[in-house]
Amino acid sequence: MNKIINNFFIAYFKYSNSSAVYVEEKTPKNMMASPVDEEGWYTWQPLKGTLNDIDYLKLESRFDVKFPKSFLEWHKQYFFLDCSCQLMGLPTSSPTEPLQQIIDNMDYSLAKDLIAAKLYPFGDEGNDAGPLVFDGRYEVENNEYPIRVYDHEYGGDLEGLSEIIFSSFPKLLECFTHYIQELKSRKNFEIIPDFFHIDPTGAGKTGVDYWLGWVAMEKENDELFGDN
């Protein structure tokens, strides 16, 4: 697992432009790698994380959720101020607001309905359909739950729950890492089908239609705008 996490962060820190808007009292000064420019932006640098297991256990108890061990190991590795690509957004980590994005993903009415059904929101689908959720309805070792998307337009009805799009969080990280590495030389819709081989029991099984939907959409965008 450490190798998967390390590979992800190495790739992501190369991929990200590492820029953020300066906000007084919220911006961590020790993460600033540049002065604030005329438009209020600065470049940030990652810091080794200092959160520990008990910090996350308190959060799980507060919201009555259970997170995969791999997700916790990943999130506590660094403080980092951005974590997204076209396909998805994952919770960041700032030393001035510890765990705040994870809290934000769970502390609203729809999220509370999902949590009551043992669907634990942890990120965002890249096309603004709704949250990424860990499906905790069946117990698995180390809480390594499969991942689905919930369409927020369904307002809590489980009809809005997608098929499994990743078999686990480690497989999500492997696919995310591959995607951002390959963007240097390939169009995004050419890369997505690689997920079927990286995660054959999730993306390559129940998630095929979901990901082929992304392929079709991004092909169309490329034909119209040539921006991929």
Image (cartoon, rainbow, N blue to C red):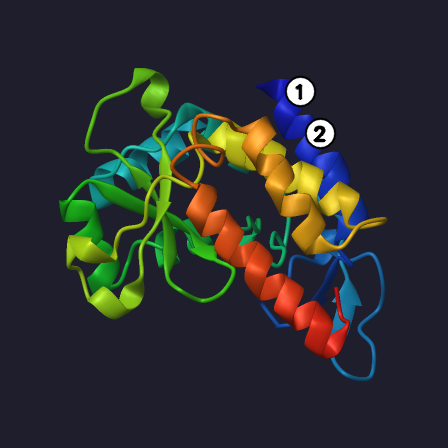
Identify which residue, 127 or 140, lies in the foreground: 127
How many neighbours does mark 2 have within 10 angstroms: few (below 14), some (14-19), or many (20 or more)? some
Q: According to the image, label 2 marks what residue? A: 7
- The residue drawn where x is 42% and y is 30% is 167
Q: Is residue 17 left or right of residue 132?
A: right
Where does the image place residue 32, in percent across and percent down from the top left? 77, 58
Q: Classify mark 1: helix, strand or loop.
A: helix
User: Does residue 21 appear anywhere in the picture?
Assistant: no
41 over 89 or under it: above or below: below
Tag of residue 77: none
Residue at figure coordinates x 61%, y 32% from the top left: 174
Query: In which quadrant will I find the N terminus?
Result: top right
Cβ atoms at labels 1 and 2 below 8 Å apart: yes
Residue farthest to the top? 141
Which quarter of the image is occupied by the C terminus?
Answer: bottom right
* Mark 1 residue type: Lys
Distance from the alpha carbon under mark 1 to that under mark 2: 6 Å
Task: Where is residue 87? Give x, y as percent.
Answer: 56, 55
Say whether residue 183 is visible.
yes
Query: Is the residue 49 above or below the residue 42 in the image?
Result: above
Pointer 1 residue = 3
Give me the residue at 48% from left, 36% from top. 203
Q: Nearer the viewer, residue 30 or 19?
A: 19
Rendering quarter of residue 217: bottom right
Q: Nearer the viewer, residue 180 or 82?
A: 180
Vertical side of 27 occupied by 112: above or below = above
Q: Is residue 154 left or right of residue 76?
A: left
Expressed as whole percent of the image width and height from the top left, the position of residue 196 reads 55, 34
> Which amino acid, mark 2?
Asn
Task: Provide the secondary structure element on which disc 2 rests.
Answer: helix
Percent position (x, y) of residue 3?
A: 66, 20
